[in-house]
Amino acid sequence: MIAVVDYRKGNLSSVQRGLQDAGLDARITDEAAAIARARAIVLPGVGSFADAAGSMEQLGQMEVLRQRIAAGVPFLGICLGMHLLFEGGSEHAAPGVPTPGLGVIPGTVDALPAADGAGRTYKIPHVGWNNVDQCVPGNPLFAGIADGEYFYFTHSYAAPPCSAAIATATHSVEFPCAVQVGEACFGVQFHPEKSSDAGAALLRNFAAIANRP
Amino acid sequence: MLTKRVIPCMDVAEGRVVKGVNFVNLRDAGDPIQLAQRYDEQKADEVIFLDITATSDKRATTVDLAARAAGELHLPYTVGGGFRTVEDIRTMIAAGADKVSVNSAAVADPSLITRASQAFGCQAIIVAIDAKRRADNPNKWEVYVAGGRKATGIDAVEWAVEAARRGAGEILLTSMDCDGSRDGFDCALTRAVARAVDIPVIASGGVGKLEHFAQGILEGEADAVLAASVFHFGELTVRQVKEYMAAQGIPVRL
C-alpha cells in the first residue's frame, strides 16, 4: 500500500488517481499507523506551510514521516509536500521565526522575489507551465523525460538553493524544483498529477522506485 | 521560462456543456470532461468550467462535475460562476477544483477575496472582471456584474489592483465590448490591467482568428489567453494557436 498523506486541508483525489494510473495501490490516509506501514509515502501539497505543518503535528504525522524517510522508505513530496521536507517555512510565520518542517533538508522556504537581479519584475504566483532543467542526467525520477520538459507549477514560495537539488526552474530567480535525499526520498515543486503526459511519466518513474525489491 | 497559457473555457449548466459546442469527432459534445480531455490532447494548458446554472439548487451537479474532473483530468481546471460565500468555495475546492473564479459576489463584498485567499491560498482564487469601455472616456473601463447586466460605476483597473491587494492569485479579464465580436481582445484594457497588477492576467473576450491570440500577449501583455467558441466549433485547435504563437516568438508549451 502507498500512503497518500491527508492532513485535512483539501482534495487529494487527483494525486491518488495519478498514482493509481501509474500502477500503485495508493490510498488516502491521515493515520500515523497506516503511514508507518506503507511501502511508499506521498505527501501532497495543499494550503500554507504553517497550516499544513500544524495539522500534521496534531495528527501525529510529522514524527512517523521523519522516521520512515530516515529508514529509506520511498517518499515523494509534491509542491508544499516538497517544501515540508525543509527545516522551516516563512509563510504565515512570525518574521525570523519560520514554522518547523520535517527538517530532512537544511534551509528555509521563502517567498519568491517579485523581481530578478536586474530589477525586472515578475508576476507572482508563479503559475503555469515552466521548463524543468535537470541538474544531473540519468536521475531515476526523470528517466525517459527530456531535460527542459514542461511541468505545471502554481506557487508563491520556493525552496532555497541546496545540494539536494536534482532539477531547477527559473522565474524571477532560479530555484530547486526537484530534490532528492538518500536513495528514495524525493520532492517536486511542480504538480505531476496536473502535468498531463510528462507528469504521468514522472509518477510511473516514482512507481518504479517505490516497487524496487 | 514560464510559458504563456492558452485556456479553453466551457459554459456549463447542470453539469453539461451548453452554448455553441459542435466539436468534430466527439461522441458527446455535451460532456465537459470529455471535451477537456480533448483539449488536453491538443496541449491546452488548463481549462475553465463556467457554471451558468441559473438556480442555486441545481449547482450540486457542478460540484459532481468538479469531483469527476479531479479523478479524470490530468491538467489544472478552474470552476467559475455563482460563488457567494467562502463555504460555496470550500465545497468546490473540497470536490477537487484547483481554482475557483469569483465575480459579482467579490464586487458586492471584497472581503470575500481576502477570506477565500486566506483559507485556500491565493493560487486558488481567480477574480473575474467583466469590463466595458466608458462612453465618456475611451481610456477608462467600468466593471459590470450579474453576467454583464449591471453597471457598478467602479473603475476596472482600480478594481483589479484592489483584488490583487486582497489576495487574488490571478485576474480573468473579459472585455464586454469585444466578447462575441471575433475582432480580437481589447488590448488597451488588457495592457492597462496587466501593468497595474503584479499577479497574472488572463485575457478574455473577442478572439476570432490566430492573430488575436498573439496580440493578447504581445500588445495586451497578458499572461494567458482564453477562448471558447473558436475551439468548441473546431475552427481552431489549441495546437494550431500555440504553433502560431510560437512562430511569433511567444514562449508556449508544445
Image (cartoon, coloured by chain):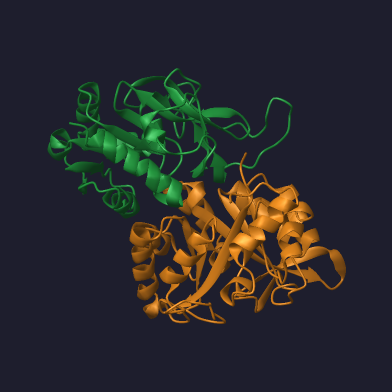
* Residue sitting nearer the eye, B251 or B202: B251
- How many marks the image carries: the answer is 0
B223 to B17, vertically: above or below: above
Question: Where on the picture, by quarter, is residue B127?
Answer: bottom right
The chain in green: A
* Residue sitting nearer the eye, B131 or B215: B215
Question: Where on the picture, by quarter, is residue A171?
Answer: top right
* Residue sitting nearer the eye, B195 or B221: B221
Judge from the rendering whether residue B37 lies leftward or rightward of residue B126; answer left or right: left
The image shows residue B222 at horizontal and vertical percentages of 70, 53
Judge from the rendering whether residue B175 lies leftward or rightward of residue B7; answer left or right: right
The image shows residue B74 at horizontal and vertical percentages of 41, 55
Q: Quadrant of the C terminus of chain A?
A: top left
Residue A139 seen from this side: yes
The image shows residue B204 at horizontal and vertical percentages of 66, 65
Judge from the rendering whether residue B249 lies leftward or rightward of residue B119; answer left or right: right
Residue drawn 59% across and 77% down? B233
Residue drawn 48% across and 29% down? A167
